[in-house]
Amino acid sequence: MNRDELIASVPIHEHNGYPYFVRLSEVPEPWRGQFEQALFGSGCPLFEGESQLAYKWDWDSWVHDQWYGCNGPTGLAD
């Protein structure tokens, strides 16, 4: 899987009509674990009936290697 395929594989969910969050359960492994580690200590959205969410903008930053000086997804095909 390359970066574009990873991005396309993870649905972005809306809140009040705006792209707002991703479900970690919908991020394929091994990138789910990598993203969870990157999120450690970060704030995450909370919605009743949902768990393990991340803000859309955090996902975008991480998947594009712009996550606060940390690595983005590793093991992607060129």
Image (cartoon, rainbow, N blue to C red):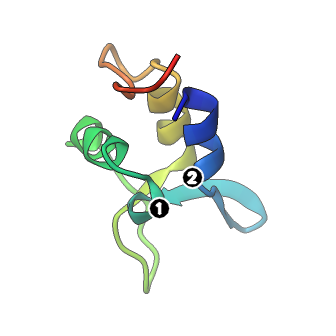
| Figure check: 32 above or below 45 | above
Indicate the quadrant where residue 7 lies.
top right
From the viewer's perspective, tell me whether residue 78 is left or right of residue 68: right
Q: In the displayed structure, does residue 3 sit left or right of residue 14?
A: left
- The residue lying furthest to the bottom in this view is 49
Give the side of residue 52 with respect to residue 27, left or right. Answer: left
Write down the quadrant of residue 50 in the picture.
bottom left
Real-space CA distance between mark 1 and mark 2, rounded to the nearest whole angstrom: 6 Å
Horizontal and vertical percent for residue 72?
A: 38, 24
Q: Position of residue 31 (x, y in %)?
A: 35, 41
Element under disc 2 = loop
Say if 27 sits above or below 35 in the image: below
Q: Residue at x 39, y 64 (%)?
A: 25
Question: How busy is the neighbourhood of tag 1: few (under 14 within 10 Å), some, or many (20 plus)?
Answer: few
Q: Is residue 42 above or below residue 77?
A: below
The amino acid type found where label 2 is placed reads: Val
Residue 18 or residue 8, whichever sits in front:
8
Image-based side of 8 in relation to 17, left or right: left
The earlier-in-sequence mark between 1 and 2 is 2
Q: Amino acid at mark 1?
A: Glu
Mark 1, residue position = 26
- Label 2 Cα crowd, 10 Å radius (few <14 / some 14-19 / many 20+): some
Residue at the spot x=47%, y=61% of the render? Answer: 26
Front residue of this view, candidates 5 and 40: 5
Residue labelled with disc 2: 10
- Pointer 1 and pointer 2: residues touching (CB < 8 Å)? yes
Closer-to-camera residue (23/17): 23
Q: Quadrant of residue 73?
A: top left
Which element carries disc 1, helix, strand or loop?
helix
Residue 60 position within the rendered picture, expressed as x and y whole percent measured from the top left: 55, 34
Q: Residue at x 49, y 40 (%)?
A: 59
